[in-house]
Structures are given as structure tokens and as C-alpha cells.
Amino acid sequence: MVSGFTQVVAVIGHPITQVKSPENFNRFFADQQLDSVMIPVDIAPEAVADFLQALRGWHNMSGVLVTVPHKQRAAALVDELTPRAQHLNAINVIRKLADGRLQGDMLDGVGFQLAAEAHGFSAAGKKGAALRLRRCGQRYRVGALRSGYPPAGPL
């Protein structure tokens, strides 16, 4: 049940109908008995700055996932970027920090790297690897494998 105490997490993109994150996160929130909900938000590219400005004053919105086509634009609009996001000049996560600032991070590559390592693959020390990746996050995944960037904090 959503109430005034519910923490909201958004996923923004344009279009947004293809995104599966709300289903997965809301199932996780329910299983963990967390008073949280993820909502899909279809934001036109020209409205991203206004949305992020509204986020600053939205007290029960704890963060945002960012998908196409907003990853680069959102990176230019947040208050700070993690070193990984600076390196890639793109973000897919926005955290609201305790002081109200917005921090952007890119976790596409980290997720791919952790999944690959869980299946016995490590790019460390390799001179090259042939990967066939489909989806817009492929350059971020390859960048993470090449750079070896570790996770930069919790989602």
C-alpha cells in the first residue's frame, strides 16, 4: 500500500514502456517488506532539467534510474559524478545525498562485470576480449571491463 511515508524511486526514459525495472524492483520491495515503490516516468529530453530540479525538492523520492536517451544529458545536470561516471560522461543512477545534492553514477558496466565474474570470467590482465553485446549500455560495460572500476557505493 502506498502512503505518505512511501519512498519513491523513479526510472526515467523516453519512451519508457520497454523498461522492466519497475516490475523487478517493486517485487523486491514487496518481498523485503520495504515501504518503497518504483514508478516509470516518460520524460521528453527537453524536460530532463526540469525533472531533476523538481527532484531536489521531492522529499520522498530517494533516487532515480536513468535510461535512454537521458544518460548523457542527466550526467551534465547533476551536482557531482562518481569517478566512473566522469570517465564515461554518462549516468544511469541518481542518488539524493543527505545534503540534497544529486550524485550521478554509472552501474551498467559494474553489473555486467560482476555477472561475468560470477560466471568465471575476469578481464583483468587480458589484452583483448571479443564481446558481442546488444543494447545501448554496451560501451559502458566494455569500459568497466577495461578500466576495472569497482562499485562506488550503494544504489
Image: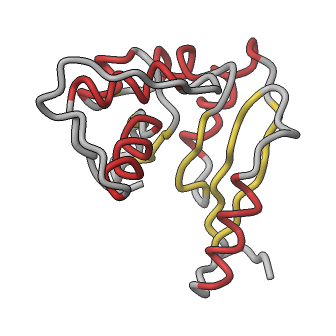
From what the image shows, is residue 134 above or below residue 96? above
Where 88 falls versus 85 (above or below)?
Answer: above
Judge from the rendering whether residue 14 lies leftward or rightward of residue 135; answer left or right: right
Q: Residue furthest right?
A: 17
In the displayed structure image, the side of residue 151 where residue 96 appears, left or right: right
Q: Residue at x 75, y 51 (%)?
A: 20
Residue 61: image quadrant is bottom right
111 or 131, which is in the foreground? Answer: 131
Q: Position of residue 92 (x, y in %)?
A: 52, 34
Quadrant including the N terminus: bottom right
Q: Which picture quadrant has residue 8?
A: bottom right
Most extreme residue toward the left, as rendered?
Answer: 125
- Residue that appears at 45% across and 25% down: 131
Q: Quadrant of the C terminus?
A: bottom left
**Count of numbered labels shown in the rendering:** 0
Q: Quadrant of residue 50?
A: top right
